[in-house]
């Protein structure tokens, strides 16, 4: 029996910070704008052990052609218990019901986590396609 609850809801800013700190993402996030980012998400799934957040995942994009799986994160104390799989299954269920035919679903996998996403038919399409990104850095 599952010992956690899954919700169709975005995490609060505090919950998001908590998960980012737990997995070492703090230095990669601009928490001044995270609340807006969470609000603009297309769909979010959160996982709770009683009232404590233990995981999340979300879909971002334009809601028409392009959808990206983002922020699949589970607190280290709860990893390897199927929580990320449950979150992904719910996100994919949402996409199957709401994304149109030929929608592009993308994501960036952390190193060593590729096989998890391959179960959902994500592939590295190189050499025909190269996944790339950049990060804007504003010196203060």
Image (tube, grey):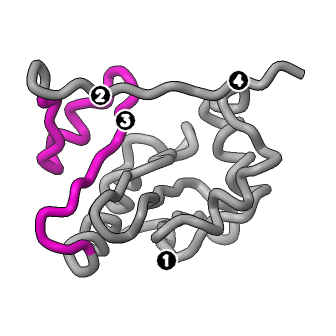
Mark 2 or mark 1, whichever is nearer to me: 2
Tag 4 or tag 2, which sits nearer the N-term?
Answer: 2
Mark 4 or mark 1, whichever is nearer to me: 4
Rendered image: mark on residue 131:
2
Give the quadrant of residue 10: bottom right
Q: Is residue 96 above or below residue 32?
A: below
Residue at mark 4: 137
Measure the alpha-carbon separation of dots 4 and 1. 32 Å
Mark 3 or mark 1, whichever is nearer to me: 3
Q: Which residues are magenta?
A: 99-125
| 23 left or right of 45 in image | right
Tag 1 or tag 2, which sits nearer the N-term?
Answer: 1
Mark 4 or mark 3, whichever is nearer to me: 4
Foreground residue among 140 and 98 = 140
Position of the C terminus by quadrant: top right
Total numbered badges shown on the rendered structure: 4
The reply to whether discs 2 and 3 touch (Cβ–Cβ < 8 Å) is: yes
| Secondary structure of residue under mark 4 | loop
Magenta highlight on residue 79: no
Measure the alpha-carbon separation of dots 2 and 1. 29 Å
| 28 left or right of 108 in image | right
Measure the alpha-carbon separation of dots 2 and 3. 8 Å
Foreground residue among 39 and 138 = 138
Rendered image: mark on residue 8:
1
Tag 3 or tag 4, which sits nearer the N-term?
Answer: 3
Residue drawn where x is 13% and y is 23% of the image: 126
Rendered image: mark on residue 108:
3
The reply to whether discs 2 and 4 touch (Cβ–Cβ < 8 Å) is: no
Q: Position of residue 121 (x, y in %)?
A: 12, 47
Measure the alpha-carbon separation of dots 3 and 1. 22 Å
| Secondary structure of residue under mark 3 | loop
């Amino acid at each position: 029996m599952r010992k956690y609850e899954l919700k169709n809801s975005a995490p609060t800013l505090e919950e998001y910070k908590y998960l980012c700190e737990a997995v070492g993402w703090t230095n990669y996030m601009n928490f001044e704008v995270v609340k807006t980012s969470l609000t603009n998400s297309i769909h979010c799934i959160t996982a709770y052990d009683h009232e404590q957040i233990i995981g999340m995942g979300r879909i971002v994009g334009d809601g028409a052609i392009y959808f990206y799986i983002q922020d699949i994160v589970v607190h280290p104390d709860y990893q390897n218990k199927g929580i990320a799989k449950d979150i992904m299954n719910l996100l994919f269920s949402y996409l199957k019901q709401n994304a149109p035919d030929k929608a592009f679903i993308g994501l960036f996998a952390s190193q060593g986590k590729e096989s998890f996403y391959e179960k959902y038919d994500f592939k590295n399409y190189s050499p025909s396609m190269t996944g790339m990104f950049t990060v804007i850095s504003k010196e203060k």
